[in-house]
Image: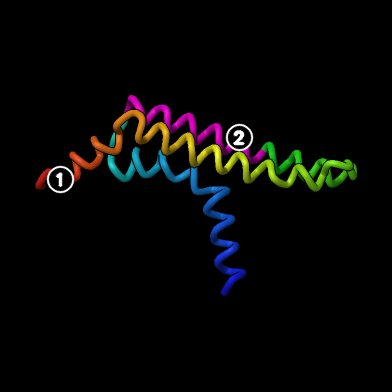
């Protein structure tokens, strides 16, 4: 049970920052403005995370002495992605707009 929780936590940290833009764009239907910032955060996260995985693997292949320390890089990118996604969402007031639109009766 503990291992399953640890795996879920790791996946949430690494890939959770990718959820902001699809939820805002396709879930809430908000386009433009802060949604565009979230889109760029989404693409930047994918690019940096894939590059960090390649870099970590490269350091293992060449047996670089700092290869153990490089394992923190994907987690740092995942954490920064969470922080930037929340900063964009709350800093732009987009969360208020989504909340206000969801309160309207259909």
Q: Please report the residue visible at 59 percent of the width from the left and 56 percent of the height from the top.
A: 10
Question: In this rendering, which labeled residue sits more in front, label 1 or label 2?
Answer: 1
The residue closer to the viewer here, 22 or 73, is 73
Vertical relation: 19 (above or below) 8: above
Determine which of the numbered discs, if any, sits on residue 47 in the image.
Answer: 2
The image quadrant that residue 77 belongs to is top right
Give the crowd class for mark 2: few <14, some 14-19, many >=20 residues within 10 Å. Answer: few
The residue closer to the viewer here, 94 or 22, is 94
**Please, which residue is most extreme toward the top here?**
33
Determine which of the numbered discs, if any, sits on residue 39 in the image.
Answer: none
Residue 18 drawn at (x, y percent): 49, 43
Q: Which residue is mark 1?
A: 103
Q: CA distance from mark 1 to mark 2?
A: 36 Å
Query: Range of the magenta residues?
Result: 32-50
Callout 2: helix, strand or loop?
A: helix
Left or right of residue 70: residue 93: left
- Number of marks present in the image shown: 2
Residue 65 drawn at (x, y percent): 89, 42
**Please, which residue is most extreme toward the bottom here?**
1
Residue 5 drawn at (x, y percent): 55, 66
Vertical relation: 3 (above or below) 42: below
Q: Please report the residue visible at 59 percent of the width from the left and 63 percent of the height from the top.
A: 6
């Amino acid at each position: 049970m503990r291992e399953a929780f640890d795996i879920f936590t790791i996946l949430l940290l690494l890939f959770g920052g990718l959820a902001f833009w699809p939820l805002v764009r396709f879930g809430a239907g908000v386009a433009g403005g802060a949604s565009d910032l979230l889109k760029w955060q989404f693409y930047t996260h994918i690019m940096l995370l894939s590059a960090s995985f390649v870099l970590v693997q490269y350091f293992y292949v060449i047996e670089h002495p700092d290869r153990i320390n490089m394992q923190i890089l994907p987690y740092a990118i995942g954490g920064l992605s969470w922080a930037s996604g929340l900063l964009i969402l709350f800093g732009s007031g987009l969360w208020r707009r989504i909340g206000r639109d969801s309160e309207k009766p259909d």
